[in-house]
Image (tube, helix red, strand yellow):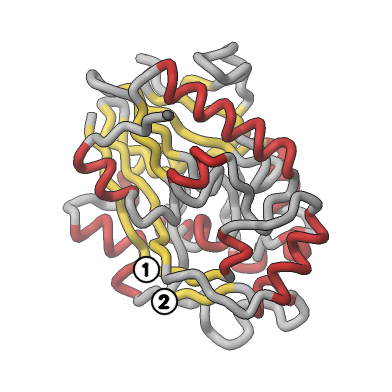
């Protein structure tokens, strides 16, 4: 089994989006909108898992059209004023996979940690693949009210009919619920709500350690360790509980953590650098 980190361009968000100062969501959103400071450009990451039962994608990165005029609704202040991205057509997930020698159409599963645009923008490269979502995420993202909550579902592929992850395989390590994706149980999905109510993470058990692919459960390893909160998380208490469970996993098992916008994710994966808690 082999894992590949794939970067699909860069994103830039406000500093208070990356590291919130307040707990209540409305206060965090207001703080974000009034923030004059931008964080550094951050990577937009997704992952390919080579498994004997088939290729597995985790998230699909951003679309090269994300900064096109009209792509983001004019009436959405957070999306319009709080973020910008740089993705060339050749940096989308499809071309990135082909450059590595893989065909997106050979993916057996596409697991979506959540459906924000910088994670779902590349879905169009995976027609008729099995797209896996949690029920809360599917309900929120595919609803007519989705754009209000940051889900630009007008850009989702028309063929999208996700399969719901049931989390009915019992507890696993620090998580109360889990779903084993592969027959050998070495690729497992766990709920990590907070950033969105239906957010989930993927855990891969290698011979030497675990790899936790956490999407936006945290924006980077340091925020995970400090218990920090991002500016747009839908539920602060759920977010804190999810990161607590990830930290507990890191205590129990050697774990390499991977987050979509952590500049160190690629290095940690390649060097097998486990996340350690003081």
Other-residue count near label 2 (Cα within 10 Å), few / some / many at <14 / 14–19 / ≥20: some
Question: Is residue 130 shown to the viewer in this render?
Answer: no
> Which residue matches tag 1?
9
Q: Looking at this rendering, what residue extends furthest in the bottom direction? A: 69
Q: Tell which of 110 and 16 is nearer to you.
A: 16
Q: Residue at x 19, y 60 (%)?
A: 99
Disc with the residue nearer the chain's start (1 vs 2): 1
Q: Residue at x 62, y 53 (%)?
A: 230
Residue 231 percent coordinates (x, y): 66, 58
Spatial CA distance of label 1 from label 2 is: 6 Å
> Which residue matches tag 2?
86
Q: Is residue 154 above or below residue 257?
A: below
Q: Tell which of 97 and 75 is nearer to you.
A: 75
- Location of residue 69 (image quadrant): bottom right
Q: Looking at this rendering, what residue extends furthest in the top direction? A: 170
- Location of residue 43 (image quadrant): bottom left
Q: Are marks 1 and 2 in contact (CB under 8 Å)?
A: yes
Question: Is residue 51 shown to the viewer in this render?
Answer: yes
Q: Is residue 117 above or below residue 254?
A: below
Label 2 element class:
strand
Residue 74 percent coordinates (x, y): 72, 83
Left or right: where does residue 196 sit relative to residue 107? right
Q: Residue at x 43, y 44 (%)?
A: 221
């Amino acid at each position: 089994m082999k894992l590949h980190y794939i970067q699909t361009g860069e994103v830039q968000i406000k500093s208070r989006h990356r590291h919130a100062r307040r707990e209540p969501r409305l206060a965090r959103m207001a703080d974000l909108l009034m923030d004059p400071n931008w964080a550094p450009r951050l990577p937009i990451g997704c992952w390919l898992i080579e498994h004997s039962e088939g290729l597995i994608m985790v998230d699909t990165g951003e679309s090269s059209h994300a900064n096109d005029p009209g792509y983001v609704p004019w009436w959405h202040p957070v999306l319009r004023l709080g973020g910008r991205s740089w993705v060339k057509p050749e940096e989308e997930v499809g071309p990135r996979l082909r450059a590595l020698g893989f065909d997106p159409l050979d993916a057996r599963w596409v697991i979506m940690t959540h459906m924000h645009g910088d994670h779902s923008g590349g879905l169009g490269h995976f027609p008729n693949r099995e797209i896996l979502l949690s029920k809360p995420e599917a309900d929120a993202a595919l609803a007519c009210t989705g754009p209000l909550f940051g889900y630009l579902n007008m850009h989702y592929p028309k063929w999208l009919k996700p399969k719901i992850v049931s989390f009915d395989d019992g507890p696993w390590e620090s998580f109360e619920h889990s779903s084993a994706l592969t027959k050998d149980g070495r690729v497992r999905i766990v709920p990590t709500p907070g950033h969105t109510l239906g957010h989930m993470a993927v855990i891969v058990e290698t011979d030497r350690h675990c790899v936790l692919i956490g999407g936006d459960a945290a924006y980077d390893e340091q925020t995970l360790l400090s218990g920090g909160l991002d500016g747009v998380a839908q539920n602060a208490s759920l977010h804190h509980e999810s990161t607590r469970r990830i930290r507990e996993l890191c205590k129990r098992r050697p774990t390499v953590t991977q987050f979509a916008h952590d500049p160190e994710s690629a290095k940690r994966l390649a060097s097998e650098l486990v996340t350690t808690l003081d």
